[in-house]
Image (tube, helix red, strand yellow):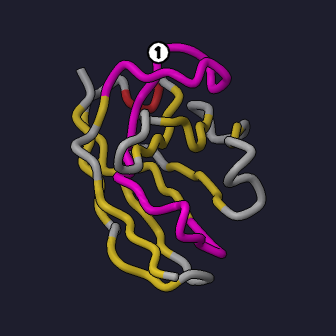
Amino acid sequence: QVHLVESGGGLVQAGGSLRLSCAASGRTFSSYASAWFRQAPGKEREFVAAISPSGSMTNYADSVNGRFTISRDNANVYLQMNSLKSEDTAVYYCAVTLGSIYSRRADFWGQGTQVTVSS
């Protein structure tokens, strides 16, 4: 079992930056790929980024590639978000997947943190 708690969300102007953090507990966390998803109002939850257990491999959605960076250490996952746009407004969820970083699915979820980008 993995327990995930996100932090770092908030209100930011378009073009600004935010860094999301996800604190993980559970002895198997470092053995699995981690990911970020997001869900905007009225839309389905969508994949944002994923990172391999070692941190050496990453995968990004086309909509954030080049603007967002996912990273991790033994107990945390981070999402650095730059050049934010109004369409990035959503609740962001940290996740752990038992599959590969290309599966774009999750098996454990955090509770989410709100990111609002004002234009």
Can residue 30 be found in the magenta stretch? Answer: no
Residue depicted at 57% across the width and 66% down the height: 81
> Looking at the image, which residue is at 44% across and 62% down?
89
Judged from the image, the secondary structure of the residue bearing numbered disc 1 is loop
Q: Position of residue 45 (x, y in %)?
A: 43, 35
Camera-side residue of 71 and 54: 71
Residue 60 x %, y %: 69, 42
Is 59 or 40 nearer to us in this picture? 40
Amino acid type assigned to the residue bearing label 1 in the image: Leu
Of the pair 16 and 51, the residue shown nearer to us: 16
Quarter where residue 87 is shown: bottom right
The answer to whether 10 is drawn above or below residue 41 in the figure is below
Mark 1 burial class by Cα count in 10 Å: few <14, some 14-19, many 20+: some
Q: Is residue 97 above or below residue 75?
A: above
Seen from this angle, which residue lies furthest top?
99
Snapshot quadrant of residue 12: bottom left
Residue 31 in the figure: left or right of residue 3: right
Q: Where are the magenta residues, as a range? A: 81-108
Residue 111, percent from left and from top = 22, 43
* Residue drawn at point x = 40 percent, y = 44 percent: 39
- Comparing 30 with 92, the one in front is 92
Residue corresponding to mark 1: 98
Q: Is residue 95 magenta?
A: yes
- Quadrant the N terminus occupies: top left
Give the residue displayed 38% in from the left and 59% down from the top.
21
